[in-house]
Image (cartoon, helix red, strand yellow):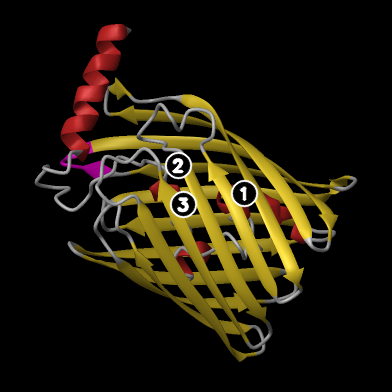
């Protein structure tokens, strides 16, 4: 087992090294990035922690689940990541009725990137809970188990947790503080310890603005701070256009994104296009949520 672990680390080093030809601008081995690129958060350029109003809050900020009132929401996500040639799938459910005063979310995510001609599979199951202490203060936490496999070589596996806080000093303003991978993040560069701060201005139904700043404490890159910006504009009742931009300094690969959201009383649909700038690659994402 020890020899296998050493071989795995060597393989990861070769695949994700900043000097790798395939990953010439990728200077981080953060494997969680694939399934964080869900259509909803990606349509805001990744600036979603202070919004956190869909099932994607399970991964971005579990505290946001407590905003959802008296619903059961089932979701499905698909993403084609041009950067890693990956097909990423996710399913989720959020229930705010089952337990008094607690919102519960459960998700399963599977990312299948191809890096340097090597196929990898990353799977994660996440259980999140959240509580509204007052209309101004929401707290949430999640426990997640992940399993990594690169062809026949096992990768870093473990159980970790995220903790999120959402503060609304006034109804139209949200502030978020999220710690990702608190347990294993100090040990695994592949699932690093991250601290995220988010802010959002919510003037629905007309428009929304959001921003996130995320610090990576485990990256070998010289720059460890990323910034994300997003906006939403309502076109007609139930249809919104979104756009965002990510300053990805960790991977030295900025991107922009565009999305269209169609919302009804029982179902919501979202389609997102994103493009990384250097090297150039295109990503397509779609999500659906049904409400009961």
Q: Position of residue 159 (x, y in %)?
A: 54, 27
* Label 1: element kind: helix
Q: Magenta span has 115? A: yes
Count residues near mark 2 (Cα–Cα under 10 Å), then give few for <14, some for 14-19, many for 20+.
many
Q: Is residue 25 left or right of residue 254?
A: left
Q: Tell which of 228 and 89 is nearer to you.
A: 228
Q: Which residue is mark 3?
A: 36
Identify the image quadrant of the C terminus: bottom right
* Label 3: element kind: helix
Q: Earlier in the sequence, mark 1 or mark 3?
A: 3
Magenta region, residue range: 114-118
Which image quarter: residue 52?
A: bottom right
Name the disc covering residue 58, or none.
Answer: 1
Residue at screen point 46% across, 36% down: 123
Q: Which residue is mark 2?
A: 110
Cα separation, mark 2 vs mark 3, equals: 11 Å
Residue at screen point 24% across, 30% down: 12
Which image quarter: residue 5?
A: top left
Front of the two marks 2 and 3: 3
* Picture layout, residue 74 above or below residue 21: below
Residue at screen point 30% across, 52% down: 250
Q: Magenta span has 30? A: no
Q: Position of residue 195 (x, y in %)?
A: 50, 47
Q: Position of residue 196 (x, y in %)?
A: 51, 53
Cα separation, mark 1 vs mark 3, equals: 10 Å
Q: Earlier in the sequence, mark 2 or mark 3?
A: 3
Count residues near mark 1 (Cα–Cα under 10 Å), then give few for <14, some for 14-19, many for 20+.
many
């Amino acid at each position: 087992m020890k020899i296998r672990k050493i071989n795995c680390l060597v393989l990861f080093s070769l695949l994700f090294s900043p000097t790798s030809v395939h990953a010439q601008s990728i200077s981080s081995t953060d494997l969680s990035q694939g399934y964080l690129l869900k259509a909803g958060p990606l349509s805001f350029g990744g600036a979603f922690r202070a919004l956190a109003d869909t099932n994607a809050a399970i991964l971005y900020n579990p505290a946001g689940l407590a905003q959802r009132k008296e619903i059961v929401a089932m979701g499905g996500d698909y993403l084609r990541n041009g950067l890693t040639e990956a097909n990423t799938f996710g399913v989720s459910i959020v229930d705010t009725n089952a337990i008094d005063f607690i919102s519960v979310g459960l998700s399963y995510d599977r990312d299948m990137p191809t890096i340097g001609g090597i196929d990898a599979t990353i799977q994660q199951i996440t259980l999140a809970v959240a509580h509204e202490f007052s209309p101004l203060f929401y707290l949430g936490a999640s426990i997640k188990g992940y399993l990594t496999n690169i062809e026949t070589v096992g990768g870093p596996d473990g159980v970790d947790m995220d903790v999120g806080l959402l503060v609304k000093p006034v109804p139209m303003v949200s502030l978020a503080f999220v710690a990702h991978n608190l347990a294993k993040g100090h040990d695994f560069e592949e699932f690093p310890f991250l601290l995220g701060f988010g802010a959002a201005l919510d003037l629905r139904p007309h428009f929304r603005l959001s921003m996130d700043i995320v610090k990576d404490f485990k990256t070998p890159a010289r720059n460890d701070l990323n910034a994300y910006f997003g906006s939403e504009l309502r076109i007609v009742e139930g249809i919104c256009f979104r756009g965002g931009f990510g300053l990805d300094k960790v991977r030295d690969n900025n991107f922009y994104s565009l999305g269209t959201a169609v919302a009804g009383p029982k179902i919501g649909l979202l389609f997102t296009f994103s493009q990384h700038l250097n090297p150039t690659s295109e990503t397509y994402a779609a999500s659906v949520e049904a409400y009961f």
